[in-house]
Structure formats: structure tokens, C-alpha cells
Amino acid sequence: MTMIEPNPVTRPRWCPRCLNRMRVTRNPYYGVGLAVHQHLSTCPQCGYVEFVRGAPRRVDPAPVATASPPASLGHRLLALAARWFAAQR
């Protein structure tokens, strides 16, 4: 069984006004305009809302560069013909 490490999104939060447990929800405006916080913390009792700082992101490994497939004979002939016509002008 894998244990989820606590982060700002999964950690329990308590309302500073009424001390009720707060709910973490996705920010419906995230990515629109200047909204940079992905989650909001809301109190169902008194309506207090605050932004939740983002959880640390996992760094994915850099993609491995692969060689492009060799050009087919037709592509090479077409490129050669284009260069030849360009040189004739």
C-alpha cells in the first residue's frame, strides 16, 4: 500500500474564523487571466475562502532525443531537384 505524502492540498485545513474543517476544491478560474492558484480552501460553515499554495510538482525526466528516420529516396530527389532549380535562376 502506498502512503500519500501530505502536501498543501492534502493536508487538513481549519477555518481561522469559526474553526470548522475547510474543504479544498479546484479553482474554477485557474488558468484564465491572472488566476495562478489551482486550488481554493473554502469553509462550508461561514464561507471563508483562501487560496492554497500549489503542491510541489514532481520533476519528470527530460525526454530522450531520438534520431529522425532517414529521408526516403523520393524526398532526397525532390530536395536535390529544388536546389538544382534554385541554382538555375
Image (cartoon, rainbow, N blue to C red):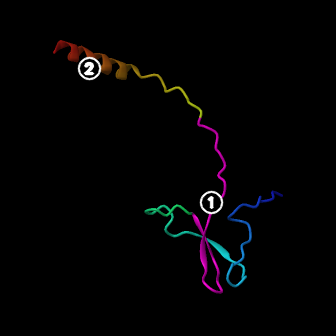
Residue situated in front as seen by the camera: 31 or 3: 31
* CB atoms of marks 1 and 2 within 8 Å: no
Residue located 30% across and 21% down the image:
78
Badge 2, how many Cα within 10 Å: few under 14, some, many 20+?
few
> For residue 82, what is the image quadrant?
top left
Which quadrant of the rendered structure holds the N terminus?
bottom right
Q: Which secondary structure is most common in the magenta stretch?
A: loop
Q: Secondary structure at mark 2?
A: helix
Give the percent coordinates (x, y) of residue 46: 63, 86
Badge 1, how many Cα within 10 Å: few under 14, some, many 20+?
few
**Does residue 49 show up magenta in the picture?**
yes
> For residue 88, what is the image quadrant?
top left
Q: Is residue 69 left or right of residue 3?
A: left
Give the percent coordinates (x, y) of residue 18: 70, 85
Q: Callout 2, which amino acid? A: Ala
Q: Is residue 79 left or right of residue 59?
A: left
Circle 1 or circle 2, nearest the eye: 1
Looking at the rendering, the stretch of residues picked out in magenta corresponds to: 38-63
Circle 2 sits on which residue? 82
Q: Is residue 17 above or below residue 81?
A: below
Residue located 59% across and 36% down the image:
63
Q: Callout 1, which amino acid? A: Gly
Q: Is residue 89 above or below residue 21?
A: above
Residue located 36% across and 23% down the image:
75
Circle 1 sits on which residue? 54
